[in-house]
């Protein structure tokens, strides 16, 4: 019998979260493992009017209430840092999911099956296949993946939905990159991992918190994790620009391309803030206002 903790960052998604927890219970109630829930409440403006563990299926439901809103990636970083310092030693298996229901809880069973075959697996990523957003947003998301790959030379197909063990949590919480992008940090520092293909569902309720500007900001945060790669990509693309200038491009086009590269460099190095609402990674646990147990 294993002990799993499911980590769920949330912001005003209490209805979706309540339905998601019921779905998780339905899918896992025939398993013999123990399950806990750790909700990182990112300073939600809406009150939670739901009884999140009405059937007492989960051994514990704990809510970390944050003082200030810091965004989902930083909420995940806060939850992982809390676990690394305070979670009991025998709780050593963790699953991270989005609370809006877009991550399919059925796939948790696939994680359990894989771990039963090999309990030494430290990381399992859920590699995204089909997405169910609007057509325009899906195009922008694929464009984000392409641009990020062209700049960092890393193609990241997974998001927050992952399995990690306590050993990895202890390591990843020592990386400041975690504050900017969870998936990019996993991809950068932990190359030996397993993966499962998983399609994304429609969110259960309400509107997505990810706007078009939010997607751009998310992309820049991922790119900031790969600053060293960016220097290499700049050099590579500069050589291409010089070659094209000799044969094709006008001086105006050269100027625009160089201007874009310089602007991008300045944004990545000086525009990505380490401090959000006065909160930094090193002091993120000070942003915990209260801890509730349900």
Image (tube, helix red, strand yellow):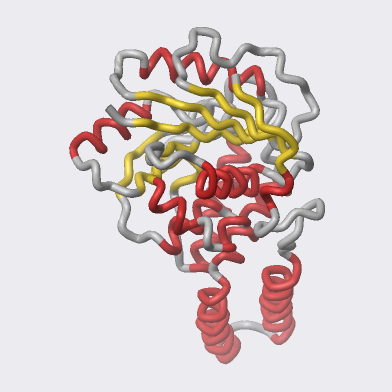
Residue 263 lies, in percent from the top left, at: 73, 74
Q: Where is residue 243 shown, x and y percent of the image? A: 53, 88
Residue 224 to residue 47: above or below: below
- x 44%, y 49%: residue: 157
Q: Is residue 89 above or below residue 49?
A: below
**Residue 21 visible in the snapshot:** yes
Quarter of the image where one finds residue 292:
top right
Residue 244 visible somewhere in the drawing:
no
Q: Residue furthest left?
A: 117
Q: Quadrant of the N terminus?
A: top left
Q: Is residue 195 above or below residue 291?
A: below
What is the number of callouts on the image?
0
The residue depicted at 68 percent of the width and 75 percent of the height is 265
Q: Is residue 191 above or below residue 158?
A: below
**As rendered, which of 108 and 149 lies closer to the eye?**
108
- The residue drawn where x is 60% and y is 19% is 294
Left or right: residue 58 versus residue 115 is right
Q: Quadrant of residue 278?
A: bottom right
Name the residue furthest bottom: 246
Residue 28 place in picture, x, y as percent: 36, 19
Residue 102 as seen in the image, left or right of residue 31 = right
Which of these two is toward me, 158 or 92? Answer: 92
At 71% from the left and 64% from the top, the residue drawn is: 272
x, y (%) of residue 125?
A: 39, 45
Question: 252 left or right of 38?
Answer: right
């Amino acid at each position: 019998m294993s002990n799993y903790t499911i980590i769920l960052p949330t912001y005003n998604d209490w209805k979706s979260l309540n339905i998601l927890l019921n779905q998780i219970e339905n899918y896992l109630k025939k398993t013999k493992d123990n399950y806990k829930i750790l909700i990182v409440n990112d300073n939600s403006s809406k009150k939670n009017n739901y009884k999140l563990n009405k059937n007492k299926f989960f051994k514990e439901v704990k809510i970390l209430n944050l003082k200030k809103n810091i965004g989902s990636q930083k909420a995940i970083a806060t939850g992982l840092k809390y676990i690394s310092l305070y979670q009991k030693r025998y709780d050593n298996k963790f699953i991270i999911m989005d609370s809006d229901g877009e991550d399919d809880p059925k796939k948790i069973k696939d994680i359990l099956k894989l771990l039963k075959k090999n309990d030494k697996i430290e990381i399992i990523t859920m590699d995204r296949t089909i997405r169910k957003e609007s057509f325009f947003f899906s195009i922008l998301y694929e464009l984000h993946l392409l641009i990020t790959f062209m700049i960092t030379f890393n193609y990241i197909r997974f998001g927050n939905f992952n399995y990690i063990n306590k050993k990895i949590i202890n390591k990843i919480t020592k990386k400041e990159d975690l504050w900017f992008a969870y998936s990019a940090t996993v991809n950068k520092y932990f190359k030996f991992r397993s993966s499962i293909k998983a399609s994304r569902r429609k969110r259960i309720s309400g509107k997505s918190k990810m706007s078009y500007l939010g997607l751009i900001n998310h992309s820049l945060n991922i790119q900031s994790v790969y600053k060293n790669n960016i220097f290499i990509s700049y050099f590579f693309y500069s050589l291409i620009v010089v070659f094209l200038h000799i044969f094709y491009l006008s001086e105006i086009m050269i100027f625009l391309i160089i201007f874009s590269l310089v602007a991008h460099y300045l944004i990545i190095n000086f525009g990505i803030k380490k401090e959000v609402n006065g909160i930094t990674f090193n002091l993120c646990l000070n942003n915990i206002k209260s801890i509730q147990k349900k």
